[in-house]
Image: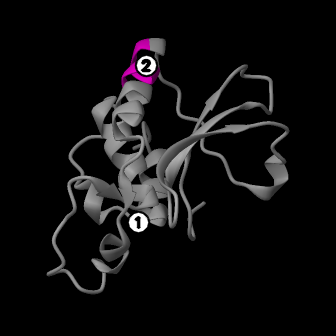
Amino acid sequence: FPSHDTKLVFSDDLLSSDGWMFGAAPGEGARYKHITGINCDDYEFVTVPISILDELEISLFCKEQEGDGYDYPGVFRFLLPWFTESPDKWFCSELCAAALQYGGVIQCVVSARITPGRLYTLLTRRGKG
């Protein structure tokens, strides 16, 4: 998670390994994907305690972005800051940060400037300090 890819996971059941994953990926863009039997040893999860209403807000935001393209130039924006933002394209951590910001989980961030590692840090330090 902190090194290269970021997804939001909405669980069908908090004790289950089944659920829905949302994110942006090259060649796929922004989309939901049903997951079953996910091997939790292959991933690092950050549990974000939120209300059901916040989760609904986040999932509605995701639904609105579903089908948007992948922001290839956005990935290079960290090295080439003059690349402009694409309003209907996303890279993985940008989309997740925007959704979490829309739901009130994180604040005062520019999602187009959030790397997977930075989002991980924001979420794991949330509520501390």
Instruction: Decide if residue 127 is on the left or right side of residue 31.
Output: left
Residue ID at (40%, 29%): 58
Q: Which image quadrant is residue 69 in?
A: bottom left
Measuring from the top left, give residue 89's x and y in whole percent. Answer: 31, 57
113 shown above or below 63: below
Q: CA distance from mark 1 to mark 2?
A: 24 Å
Instruction: Say which of 107 and 83 sits in front.
Output: 83
Tell me which residue sits at (48%, 14%) in the image: 52
Give the structural element (helix, strand or loop) at label 1.
Answer: loop
Q: Residue drawn at (41%, 31%), measured in percent from left and top?
A: 63
Q: Horizontal and vertical percent for residue 124? A: 51, 48
- Along the viewing direction, whichever of 57 and 127 lies nearer the viewer: 57
Q: Nearer the viewer, mark 1 or mark 2?
A: 2
Residue located at (30% from left, 39% from top): 101
Which residues make up the magenta segment?
53-57
Identify the image quadrant of the C terminus: top left
Q: Would residue 91 be counted in the magenta stretch?
A: no
Residue 34 pos. (x, y %): 68, 36
Dominant secondary-structure state across the stretch colored magenta: helix
The quadrant holding residue 98 is: top left
For mark 2, does the 10 Å Cα neighbourhood hold few (<14), some (14 to 19), or many (20 or more) residues? few
Q: Which of the two discs, 1 and 2, labels the residue nearer the N terminus? A: 2
Please say if 42 is above or below 57: below
Left or right of 74? Residue 26 is right
Amino acid type, mark 1: Thr
Q: Which residue is mark 2?
A: 56
Q: Which residue is mark 1?
A: 115
Question: Do we see residue 31 in this rendering?
Answer: yes
Amino acid bearing label 2: Leu
